[in-house]
Image: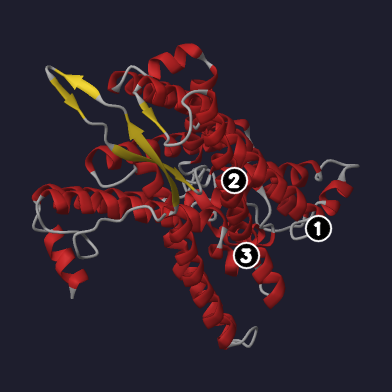
Amino acid sequence: MQIIQSFQNIFKIPELRNRLLWTFGLLIVFRLGSHVPLPGVNPDAIAAWREEMDRAGESIFHLVQVFSGGSIGNLAIFSLGIMPYITASIIMQLMTKVSPNLEAIAKEGPSGQRKIQAYTRYAAVPVCLVQGFFAAKQLAVFSAAQLEQNRMQLLLSHSFGNMLFIMLGLTAGSLFIMWLGEQITDRGVGNGASMLIMAGIVARMPAIIGDMFKGARDGLHSMETVLFILALYVAAIVAVVFVTQAQRRIPLQHAKHIRGRRMMAGGRNFLPIRVNTAGVMPVIFASSLMIVPQLLGLIPGLGWLKESIDRGGFFFTLLYVTMIFFFSYFWTYLFMRPQEISLQLKEAGSFVPGIRPGENTSEYLNSILSRITLCGAAFLCVISLLPDLTSNALGLQRYLVQFLGGTGILIVVGVALDVINKIESHLVMHHYGTFLGGSTRVQGRR
């Protein structure tokens, strides 16, 4: 009853109601565009393309499938999804930490953030063109293979003009999605890019669950297996929520200071450090780089590379886990530098009780951050390998259990928590309590 009352309270707030309507409306536009076919593509051959994608689950298109919400399986104009914009955003975040000029612009406040956002849009255009070119080339290769097998061709023509139209169509669709994401961020609820990714992932889940029940009816696996997978998915969500909200709170003591003729006593506060500070980025980086051996294996003479680093094998798992650990530490220490944090605390007159300010505080924070990151990286490895372990143990195709882990579940849970926090902020501001009831908001767990 409390949840029903919370939903009723949501629609009593005009601003929040309008934001939700804007969000749902733009998400509907996004899903409609996922079914508009690309120019120059034969609609009758799309089914064969989708079957080929399901068999080649380790390809680069499988990763794009996650971020495009199945659009690339339909060869829709939104096939690239939001991935080019995310790539440009990651590049700009890294460049901001490397380039002193960009870092100075980012520290200018809202005006600096708007400049960085504009640079990100400009950087997304060449990324769209490059990814659109490789996507069109891969479609041409697949269509040529169909021609050699006397099958229906995927492309109506292999001419330069048709390939150019496909590349431009993919670019235009990706830029339009980027605009949709910005509109959701400005007028809707939550981060627009993340909302679009989550919408694409959630939209594919009913079809996957339907295939699982269909396989149970056809005798490919038992109904108990389906129920076990669904229960495992619920448990994975609970674990991801727990680790995502988990944090280590370092106590801080603020020094006394004088205001006018009064001496203000120093207060106490906490410096929160999340267990999974890097978020989903290590999994995205590791998944992207693990595709490289698969692509190199297509080159004549390098087929052994694809066979030796096959998905689910020992070397694949070892390399995948190593990359996740590396990128977890790399991303965490890139954006949380203990030396800078200790310097900022010293300048603000704050200190950790029992720890001398300066170098000792930096070493103390570094020791905590390294151990916390180790736990977060280990959790990312477990949640990323869960689909492979489950499919091998139960003898199922990987696409049936891919929603159990990896980037999909991390993104969905992270976006859902962010949306709940945004809704709770509006509810609390208008004195309606919290979304989940009570007076305590969703906070990090210690």
**In the depicted structure, whether residue 203 falls above or below residue 99:** below
Q: In this view, does 405 lie to the left or right of 446?
A: right
Decide if residue 388 is in sight here: yes
Asked if the residues shown at circle 1 and circle 2 are in contact, with their CB atoms under 8 angstroms apart, the answer is no
Question: Which secondary structure lies at badge 2?
Answer: helix
**Mark 1 vs 3: CB contact within 8 A:** no
Residue at 19% over, 27% down: 264
Q: Callout 2, which amino acid?
A: Arg
Helix, strand or loop at mark 3: helix
Q: How far apart are marks 3 and 2 (CA)?
A: 26 Å
Mark 1 is on which residue type? Phe
Q: Which amino acid does label 3 sit on?
A: Pro
**Farthest-out residue, top:** 101
- Whether 230 is drawn above or below 259: the answer is below
Drawn side of residue 140 relative to residue 189, left or right: right
Earlier residue among tags 1 and 3: 1
Residue bearing the label numbered 1? 314
Which residue bears the numbered disc 3?
387
